[in-house]
Amino acid sequence: MVRFVGALDKEPECAASILGLATIARMATNGVDLAPLKTELVQKAAREGEAGALFDLSIIERLSGNPESADVFQAAALQRGRRFLAPLARDAVDPVRVLALAAPGDFMSNTPLEFLVEGHNLALETLYLRPDEDFPATLPEHDVTFVAVAEMDANQIILEKIDGAMRASARNIVNQPSLIARLTRDGAWSLLHDAPGVSFPPNARVDRQRLVAMANGDVSVLYPIIARPVGSHAGDGLRKIDSAKEIVAFLGEQSASQFYIAPFVDYRSGDGLFRKYRIVLIEGVPYAVHMAVSKNWMVHYLNADMFENEANRAEEAHFMAAFDAEFATRHAVALAEVHRRTGLDYVLLDCSETRDGKLLIFEAGTAMVIHTLDPDVVFPYKRPQMEKIFDAFEQMLRRRVPGC
């Protein structure tokens, strides 16, 4: 067991510099052995109790599939400091100072801003807040505040505290916390299901006892349905259920007490393949993030046949190149209504299209990742599209700086 030098009882005057998620994830994606870096950071943390080293260790552990040790390192880092500086672009000149308000937790707990600001003229400092502590009386010097805290049960108290403390500072805040808090799966459905041009399957939050009643036949069910534990993402724990017997099997696999259930929608295109899109709205303007094509209904970019299938990549390249004229035009009314109803400056949709031409929404949120980690030699069309998004993101932030 590594021992670290004493924790600080108060916020340090300076933020700790970190390599951060974008840098470390890029190293891992490029095949860099992270073991030497991990050894170096452990030695630095043990010797100096440096919050930045501990925080980077938590990132390495989480990327390595070790969530328990990642939580330990993150907790140790946050005992020593709450402020962390992401790497600044080498050519940055008088950058806009962005203060991100964040919550402890895994990669889905906050908007992954480091990927969005990487290489741009933006200085990102992240301040971590805790649900059991008061909102800070003073904040670090900054030009614009971005509420990075994402919607999840564990973050609701933090979102409430930010909202209460910063309600009068709306001018330079991106993503109002009270609006983020509404984006539970059932909350997003309530907001968007009856929007013109939108199809959004009803999402209901149920407890374990309700699922047991469904399995026992005490509650009528129109199969198939999909079910997942509350708080799960990226398909973790997500199941398509066709019978009461399968509910029993599902509950045997899951220890959670709360679940979301929804009717299963067969969203196959005419060729029998499933297509899932990720769209980001920046101040209401839609941008294509990615498109995945799969034979399976549970589509995620990493499990779809995108790396190996040239035809799928060609289709995604066309989707991005023609996005404004085709997808964004077909769904202009629906996307505008999503922006109006969510009220968020920055929000993402995982979605598809129904056979009758509606925008089929699976999820709306602020913590979905946008990145340039995919190899350019395989995906030459993606980096220009991502840079288009990053430029729009920077311009949004600049418009929020007082006096600009």
Image (tube, rainbow, N blue to C red):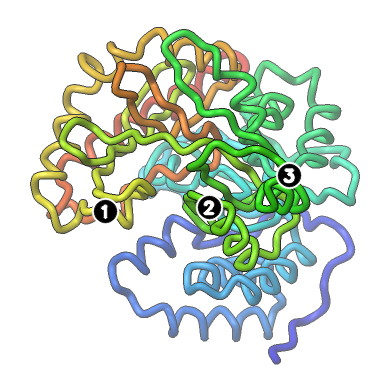
Q: Please name the residue shown 74% across and 67% down the image.
A: 75
Label 1 CA crowd tier, 10 Å (few <14, some 14–19, many 20+): some
For label 2, the residue is 86
Furthest residue in direction front, as rendered: 217
Could you tell me how far apart the alpha carbons at marks 1 and 3 are, in whole angstroms? Answer: 48 Å
Q: Please name the residue shown 34% across and 14% down the image.
A: 331
Could you tell me how far apart the alpha carbons at marks 2 and 3 are, in whole angstroms? Answer: 53 Å
In terms of sequence position, does the residue under pointer 2 or pointer 1 come before the other?
Answer: 2
Query: Tag 1: residue type?
Result: Asp
In terms of sequence position, does the residue under pointer 1 or pointer 3 come before the other?
Answer: 3
Nearest the camera: 331 or 239?
239
- Residue 118 shows which numbered tag? none
Q: Is residue 114 above or below residue 315?
A: below
For label 1, the residue is 374
Q: Secondary structure at mark 2?
A: loop
For label 3, the residue is 218
Residue 32 in view here? yes
Query: Tag 2: residue type?
Result: Ala
Could you tell me how far apart the alpha carbons at marks 2 and 1 are, in whole angstroms? Answer: 21 Å
Q: Secondary structure at mark 3?
A: loop
